[in-house]
Image (tube, rainbow, N blue to C red):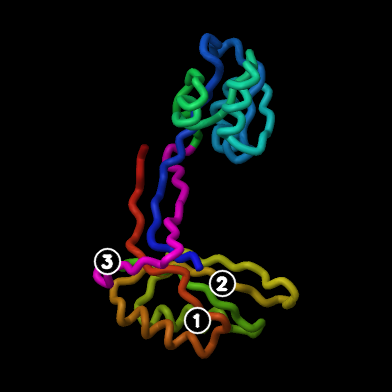
């Protein structure tokens, strides 16, 4: 019963944190989630003496250092986690890609209504039979109605060989044209549904 009512793009900033008093040259091991380690690979290439150890979560790594008083050990985490667990930041913004954003969806159980004039994006889903040109036909119809695709992702349907569920984000310039496009693709799809209609997200730098 959850519906998408908005989105935010948050810039991912990674920091090397440790117990207070620990210096950069003291660090022998660094713990963090595998993705965070990958995001900071260039920084650690400059510090081959540091052993990188994967953990289940960035914030949990910071918490473990704080609670277990782990000396000579660092973690990759956010400013918030460092502050929460009383850790020092030894190096800021160590991520390789300074333009790395993660998209977060805003969900509502009640499916609050967004004024039509503010709707500029929608997330829809549908499944297609395994036939030649089935997806191409859907994309052609959307193009005919001037619907721009922001994202398309497919997931195999369990128990149905070679059939996929498609999750599509579309940008809306004209709401009536968007609704007509859904009516047009409906006969060629199964389980067509709307996950949410909302305003296009903003980028948050901090």
Please check the rendered image and state whether residue 108 is part of the magenta-colored stretch, yes or no.
Answer: yes
Identify the residue position indicated by label 1 in the image. Answer: 138
Kind of element beneath mark 1: helix
User: Residue farthest to the left?
Assistant: 117
Q: What residue appears at the point 47 percent right and 85 percent down from the top-left corner?
A: 185
Q: Is residue 2 above or below residue 202?
A: below
Labels 3 and 1: the sequence-earlier one: 3
Q: Residues within 10 Å of mark 1 (few under 14, many from 20)?
A: some
Q: Please say whether residue 87 is visible from this viewpoint.
A: yes
- Asked if the residue under mark 1 is in contact with the one under mark 2, i.e. CB atoms within 8 Å, the reply is yes
- How packed mark 3 is, by other alpha carbons closer than 10 Å (few <14, some 14-19, many 20 or more), is few
Mark 3 vs 2: CB contact within 8 A? no
- Asked whether 148 or 193 is in front, the reply is 193
- Span shown in magenta: 97-118
- Tell me which residue sits at (44%, 59%) in the image: 107
Element under label 2? Answer: strand
Of tags 2 and 1, the one toward the viewer is: 2
* Of marks 3 and 2, the one in the foreground: 3
Q: Earlier in the sequence, mark 2 or mark 1?
A: 1
Q: Which disc number belongs to residue 166?
A: 2
How far apart in space, not on screen, are marks 3 and 1 (Cα)?
Answer: 26 Å
Residue in the image at 57% along x and 37% along y = 36
> Which numbered disc, 3 or 1, marks the residue closer to the eye?
3
Left of 69 or right of it: where is 140?
A: left
Image quadrant assignment for residue 189? bottom right
Circle 3 residue = 118
Q: Nearer the viewer, residue 39 or 45?
A: 39
Q: Which of disc 2 and disc 3 is earlier in sequence? A: 3
Q: Whole-percent x and y of residue 116?
A: 27, 72
């Amino acid at each position: 019963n959850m519906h998408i009512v908005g989105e935010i793009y948050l810039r991912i900033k990674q920091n090397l944190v440790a117990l207070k008093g620990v210096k950069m040259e003291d660090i022998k091991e660094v713990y963090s989630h595998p993705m965070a380690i990958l995001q900071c690979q260039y920084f650690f290439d400059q510090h081959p003496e540091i052993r990188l150890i994967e953990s289940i979560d960035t914030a949990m790594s910071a918490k473990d250092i704080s609670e277990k008083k782990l000396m000579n050990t660092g973690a990759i985490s956010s400013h918030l986690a460092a502050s929460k667990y009383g850790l020092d930041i030894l190096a800021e913004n160590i991520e390789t890609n300074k333009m790395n954003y993660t998209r977060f969806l805003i969900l509502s159980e009640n499916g609050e209504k967004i004024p039509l004039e503010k709707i500029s994006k929608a997330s829809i889903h549908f499944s297609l039979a395994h036939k030649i040109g089935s997806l191409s036909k859907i994309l052609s119809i959307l193009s005919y109605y001037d619907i721009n695709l922001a994202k398309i992702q497919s997931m195999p349907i369990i128990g149905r060989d070679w059939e996929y569920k498609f999750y599509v984000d579309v940008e809306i310039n004209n709401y009536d044209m968007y609704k007509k496009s859904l009516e047009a693709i409906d006969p060629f799809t199964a389980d067509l549904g709307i996950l949410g209609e909302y305003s296009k997200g903003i980028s948050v730098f901090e």
